[in-house]
Image (cartoon, grey):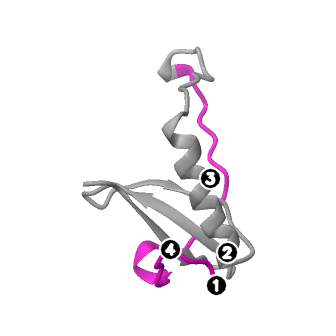
Amino acid sequence: MAGMFELFIDAEASFRFQLTAPDGTVMAVSRPFPSKAAAVEGIAAVREYAGMGHVKELAAAPAEHRFVSRPHTAVRPLSTRMPLQFQGTAR
């Protein structure tokens, strides 16, 4: 079974999508998009790029010496997100 793209509106009223694995694990969360149509275009781009994507290691230091920085995102917890009906067309 394939993963699923889920469209939602974040805490700042921007459109985002997340890619979930068949077991429900969130594998990736998109950047914010200004419209649903733009988010749908983002999904199309991810589908295209992921199929031919290469793996590039950016950190050569051992894991215990790496500093992992995570950007701050204003995304509501999964239980409070408002899912959108996505039928494959932008509106």
Q: Earlier in the sequence, mark 2 or mark 4?
A: 2
Real-space Cα distance between discs 1 and 3? 18 Å
Circle nearer the N terminus (1, 2): 2
Queried whether the magenta region covers residue 83, the answer comes back as: yes
Cα separation, mark 1 vs mark 2, equals 6 Å
Marks 1,2: beta carbons within 8 A: yes
The one of 63 and 16 positioned closer to us in this rendering? 16
Residue 75 sits in quarter: bottom right
The amino acid at mark 3 is Ala
User: Which residue has dot 3 on it?
Assistant: 45
Give coordinates of residue 87: x percent, y percent. Answer: 46, 79
Question: Looking at the image, can residue 12 be seen?
Answer: yes
At 59% across and 36% down in the image, what residue appears? 68
Mark 4 lies on residue: 88
Q: Determine the secondary structure under disc 4.
A: loop
Determine the CA span between mark 3 and mark 4: 14 Å
Q: Who comes first in sequence, dot 3 or dot 4?
A: 3
- Please, what is the three-letter code of the amino acid marked with disc 4? Gly
Q: Residues within 10 Å of mark 3 (few under 14, many from 20)?
A: few
Splitting the image into 4 quarters, where does residue 26 fall? bottom left
Q: Which residue is mark 2?
A: 37
Q: Position of residue 88 (x, y in %)?
A: 50, 74
Q: Residue at x 58, y 42 (%)?
A: 49
